[in-house]
Image (cartoon, grey):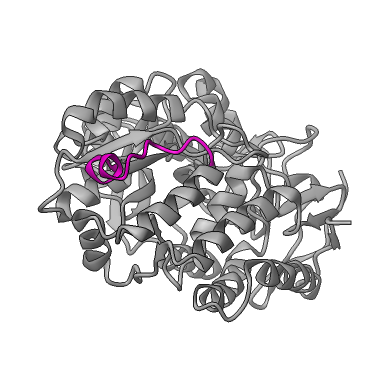
Amino acid sequence: MNAMKRFITGAAAVSLAASLAACGGGPAATPAGPSADPGVEGTDSQPVTLNYWGWKKGTADQVKLFNAAHKNVQIKYTEVKGGSDALNGLRNAASAGNAPDLQQGNQDWMVPLVAEKVAADVTPWLSPSKDKFRESAYKASQVNDHNYVVPTEQAPQFFVYQKPIYDAANLSAPKTMDEFVDQGKVLAGQGHKITNMAGEDPSTLVNWAWQAGAQWYKADGDTWKINFLDRATMEAADVTQKLIDEGAISTQTFADYAAVQQMYDKGNTATRHIWTWSTNGMVSNFKESFGNWAAAPIPEFSTGGNANVSPIGGIFVTEQSKSKKAAAEAAVWLATEKESVTIAADPIKGASSFPVIADSDSYVSTLLPEKLFGANHAEAVKVAVEASKNIAPDWTYGPNYTAMYTELADGWARVITKQQKVTDLLKHMQEWTINDLKKKGINAADGSV
């Protein structure tokens, strides 16, 4: 197993095997962390208590179900603020030696948390339940064939649009991103923006590059190969640039969530590339356009085919847990038990989470609000089910992804305000990412040559 240079977080330096660099594939290797350590196991008279930190709606009710069904293990749930706050809170707790046993988190946390020796290898306790999970979600939970997070949700992406607006313009749902660009011109001429790209949020560019088949980070032996300039990324960049140049997009900040939703509701912005959980937010904020929305497969890039973007969410077991086996098995129960999954998928009681269980199709009808789609609801369900079968593989979140994304966002603001081109930003990110990795003591090379 090749040794990768140090991965540095703050003042702490830790090492990670290079074979742990590529998510969802690669040659088999020994885990970087300690071997399977079950830790303390509880009994009915002396149950183990697991500390679980999370933020998603419905989690507390899932924990109640678990506790009612188990005597030897109990979960103590603490609600925390989500996103980067949750990640930083976990890191701080781990540094202080008091990390929780379980932590809700996202796929982009995985490589850094493995490198920092915060996330435990849960393969021994997850692999027996492999058949309970969708294959794409199970693979996304892996670093070099070892599982470091128990997947709980996916987010297959599809396309939604205001059908009356499209009908009035004599348009149908675009099949390709080239058609999407052309429709942007037509809709702009009729007073509608085709999509929204907030100046502080480059996620559209990231998602489109991923969908098109890009691999910005790729592990090669003991080196990270960086490539923001491949054909797939350039195709995504070209689509993005055309929409910006033609004035086909709105640029409403997501900081004013209500204003963004109002644009969709009133038809100022006519389409969205969307995930199932986002539809619930539309229902909660709309007043005028209920029943007007229709769904279609996501428009295709020539390099990516019909693939779509679907990051996973999940539950990490920490290295500091004194009961790793109990924690991992509890996470599997929360992710796969029918009543628990039903709560997570519920748009009202839960977070409209798309289940990662193998037989998740039956949940999709509930996930997509009939109020939003009206007579188009049945077709929307078919679209979402099909999207879940066409998830783009091989996207890797590299060890400095958070820092990279911050730098990307700074440049993205200048792209949206037409101070620089998308390709200028990508050239900068190519150089910046390689240099940042090297500064952190990580082997990195230009993968675009």
Between 421 and 213, which is closer to the camera in this rendering? 421
The image shows residue 359 at horizontal and vertical percentages of 39, 18
Judge whether residue 70 can be spotted in this image.
no
Residue 287: say if magenta. no
Q: Quadrant of residue 403?
A: bottom right
Q: Position of residue 402 (x, y in %)?
A: 58, 66
Q: Say left or right for 130 vs 103.
A: right
Q: Is residue 97 above or below residue 390?
A: below
- Above or below, 364 against 219 in this view is above
Image quadrant in which you'd find residue 171: top left
> What residue do we see at 43% from left, 24% from top?
386
Circle count:
0
Can residue 228 be seen in this snapshot?
Answer: yes
Of residues 442 and 362, which is closer to you in this image? 362
- Is 257 above or below relative to 384? below
Which of the pair 359/184 is nearer the observer?
Answer: 184
Q: Is residue 75 above or below residue 389?
A: below
Looking at the image, the residue that sits furthest to the bottom is: 419
Q: Which quarter of the rendered picture does the N terminus lie within?
A: top right
Q: Quadrant of the C terminus?
A: bottom right
Q: Is residue 310 left or right of residue 233?
A: left
| Frontmost residue, 424 versus 395 | 424
Residue at position x 35%, y 53% from top? 54
Where does the image place residue 150, in percent across and percent down from the top left? 49, 38
Q: Which residues are magenta?
A: 162-176
Q: Is residue 201 left or right of residue 36?
A: left
Q: Is residue 171 magenta?
A: yes
Task: State the image coordinates of residue 337 (x, y, percent, origin top left).
Answer: 33, 25
- Identify which residue is drawn at 66% across, 51% down: 235
